[in-house]
Image (tube, grey):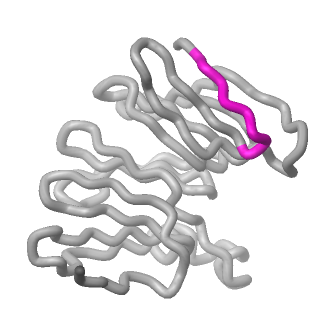
Amino acid sequence: MKKLKLSQERLWSLQLKSNKAYVGDYKGRLFIVDLISKKLVKKIDFGKQFYSKDKRIKEGLGPSTWVLETIKNKIIVANRWGGIFVLKNNKIIKKFQTKESFTRGQKIKNNKMLFGTRTGKIFTFNLKNGKLELMFKFKKSYQKENAIYGIHKFKNHYWVCFADGDLIKIKL
């Protein structure tokens, strides 16, 4: 077993594709690791690149790369500060900024994503035109925010789990 230290911060997300590991951390960085050589190929710092003037950066907070998904030959990255980035060949080709705080994402079609937020909302997102559409909003019952921590497809439904302890089946 070989350990590769990528960050001094919490690692939030992991996606594997074509012998590469895509890993996101608390500060909003994306680390791209070659799984064969076990070496860092590239690091993209979304926090510094897109949020450097944000006062939260100066306070030591980060945009947290919580969502990583692969769609065809693209990597989709979303963070808790509302940023959605589309990468191809390890380069950012599209950027969208929203007001939502994304915690999870799931591909639903070649150009469409399902996103969950820290506040219990589920959105569809069109990667071509940047349209974010609210599908469901679940109210909190125990937790401060009722974050969505998991979205997975099973047959024709999506299963969503929440910080409040709920597991919900939805059909789009």
Left or right position of 155 against 82 = left
In the depicted view, which residue is nearer to us: 61 or 106?
106
Decide: is 108 above or below 29. Answer: above
Decide: is 5 above or below 172. Answer: below
Residue placed furthest toward the front: 1
The location of residue 86, given as percent across then percent down, is 34, 48
Is residue 18 magenta-colored?
no
Left or right position of 30 against 56 = left
Q: How many marks?
A: 0
The location of residue 40, given as percent across then percent down, is 23, 79
Visible residue check, residue 53: yes
Q: Which residues are magenta?
A: 163-170
The location of residue 68, given as percent across then percent down, is 40, 51
The location of residue 144, given as percent across then percent down, is 86, 51
Residue placed furthest toward the left: 36
> In which image quadrant can residue 112 be found?
top left
Q: Residue at x 89, y 37 (%)?
A: 141
> In which image quadrant can residue 115 be found?
top right
Q: Residue at x 54, y 75 (%)?
A: 10
Q: Residue at x 44, y 36 (%)?
A: 106
Visible residue check, residue 94: no
Left or right position of 70 against 121 = left
Q: Residue at x 84, y 31 (%)?
A: 139
Decide: is 70 above or below 20. Answer: above
Decide: is 22 above or below 161. Answer: below
Pick the quarter of the image with the N terminus: bottom left
In the depicted view, which residue is nearer to us: 114 or 157?
157
In the depicted view, which residue is nearer to us: 46 or 129?
46
Left or right position of 140 against 111 = right
